[in-house]
Amino acid sequence: MIVVLGGTGFVGAHTAMALAARGHEVVATRRGTGPVPRVLAPGVADGAVRIAQVELTDAAAVERLFAEERPDSVVDLSGHAPKELDPATDVRERTAMLTAVLEGVRACGVPRLTVTSSTDVYWCLPPEEIPYTEDARVVLQESADNFLTQAWAKKLLEIVSGMLARAYGTELLTVRLGGVYGPGYGTYLSLISRLARAAVLGEEPDYARERGGIPVAEAGYDLSYAADIADGIATVHLAPHPARPVYNIGAGRAVTHGEVTRAVEEAVPGFTGRLRSRPDAVARRPNPWMSTERIRTEFGWAPRHPLAEGVRAYVAHLCEELR
């Protein structure tokens, strides 16, 4: 049995379903109460996935959960939205959650823990480091804040989890995820989610909150369909003897805003994304993406959903959710 912490969240729900699809019993945790996410509903209905409520900042509660469930392993996809809390509270909560998880794993003898980091750890690396590899020398002193996310939070996670895992003798795996889109993404922060939502609702794309105004078609970043990311996490987590402690999971290339827009326009005929073109922008600042050579070479993993196919599935999901 596998416990997926944060298993009712966006990537967590997809990961719980990916593990269940491979024949594992899964307990997906959440902080509060509420309806079962649509992504998880089939797994809950057939009994492959159970939902448990736990406050991850409460070390005693986390240890009770592990003691009761006796998991074979744990995947940690917990967290909260970037910049949701003030900085001091954010540091305290993230550190408390991670410490509680590592202490619970140690106390209950859980053999393996996989923690989820992201491409944000590569924030502030120079352009010549692209594509980013797992062996890149991460920059700790950041010169500027990532305007969308909090890169420091992922760096903190990797430092603290690595330190405690070594001290406790826990087998720790870290997966660094690229950008993710697909069913269950509810914040509409990413361009692809805002375009898909506008297309489904028959609205004009709204770029009023877009940093820098109307997005540049040639710009982009590492972006993958949620089911592919979840499959990558399951692949690494279930591997009998991973050769390395860290694996990038992503598209293996930069997906441009123009590609995303065309995919949405094809999925919803009549919709127009209305981007602007600036080929010189990429020449000055290359689009960031992560190398996936390690996970491809060691496990034969690769994304299964081409962009057009993933966008069609995402649009179909939003049609049911928003209309």
Image: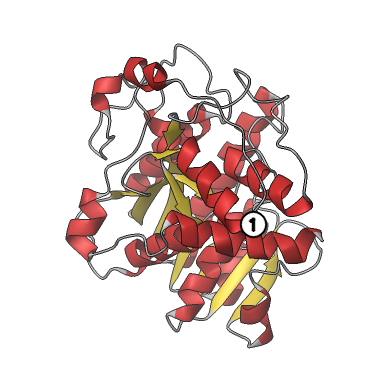
Q: Residue furthest bottom?
A: 46
Q: Residue at left 67%, top 64%?
A: 317
Residue sitting nearer the eye, 158 or 215: 215
Res 195 seen here: yes
Left of 160 or right of it: where is 313?
right
Left of 35 or right of it: where is 158?
left
Does dot 1 land on a helix, a strand or a loop?
loop
Q: Which residue is mark 1?
A: 9
Q: Badge 1: how crowded within 10 Å, few (<14), some, or many (20+)?
A: many
Q: Residue furthest top?
A: 143
Total residue callouts = 1
Asked if 104 appears above or below 178 in the picture, the reply is below
Res 80 seen here: no
Q: Residue at left 59%, top 57%?
A: 267
Asked if 61 appears above or below 155 in the picture, the reply is below
Q: Amino acid at mark 1?
A: Gly
For the C terminus, which image quadrant? Answer: bottom right
Residue 71 place in picture, x, y as percent:
49, 73
Residue 84 place in picture, x, y as percent:
71, 33
Q: Residue at left 60%, top 30%?
A: 91
Residue sitting nearer the eye, 254 or 49: 254
Residue 53 place in picture, x, y as percent:
72, 64
Q: How is the image coloured?
A: secondary structure
Residue sitting nearer the eye, 93 or 224: 224
Residue 286 place in picture, x, y as percent:
34, 24
Left of 170 or right of it: where is 101?
right
